[in-house]
Image (cartoon, helix red, strand yellow):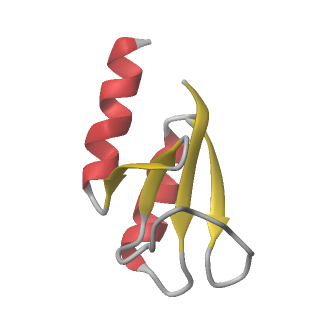
Amino acid sequence: MKGEGYVLYVGNDCFSCNKIEQFIKDNNVNVSTINIDEEEYSLPFSLMIIPALVKNEKLIAYGPDIIKQIEQFKAAS
């Protein structure tokens, strides 16, 4: 699945982040990942919850809802 323009924001020691990253890997989803604890990033809003899926600087989903969103991407492609 192509995830063009999608960015997954994760953090260190985040169980949900690890789960989402593994789901993305297992399903061969092409999504960029930024670890907010280790990398510089800039968004027009504050990230209050991680993991967070963003496209074009707009929050698409966060937490376990990311899996549902990715499944919708896959169904549409």
Q: Is residue 66 visible?
A: yes
Q: Nearer the viewer, residue 6 or 15?
A: 6
63 left or right of 43 in image? left
41 left or right of 57 in image? right
Q: Is residue 25 visible?
A: no
Q: Does 35 sit above or below residue 4?
A: below
Residue 34: which quarter of the image?
bottom right
Residue at 57% x, 63% y: name it.
43
Residue 30 image point, x, y percent = 62, 36
Residue 50 image point, x, y percent = 41, 72
Number of numbered discs = 0
Residue at 48% x, 68% y: name it.
18
67 left or right of 50 in image? left
Residue 31 image point, x, y percent = 60, 42
Residue at 25% x, 51% y: name it.
65
Q: Does 76 sit above or below residue 9?
A: above
Q: Residue furthest front?
A: 44
Q: Does 72 sit above or below residue 26?
A: above
Q: Quadrant of the N terminus?
A: top right
Residue 69 image point, x, y percent = 31, 38
Q: Does 73 sit above or below residue 25?
A: above
Q: Nearer the viewer, residue 6 or 56?
A: 56
Residue 46: which quarter of the image?
bottom left
Q: Nearer the viewer, residue 46 or 60?
A: 46
Q: Quadrant of the C terminus?
A: top left
3 left or right of 75 in image? right
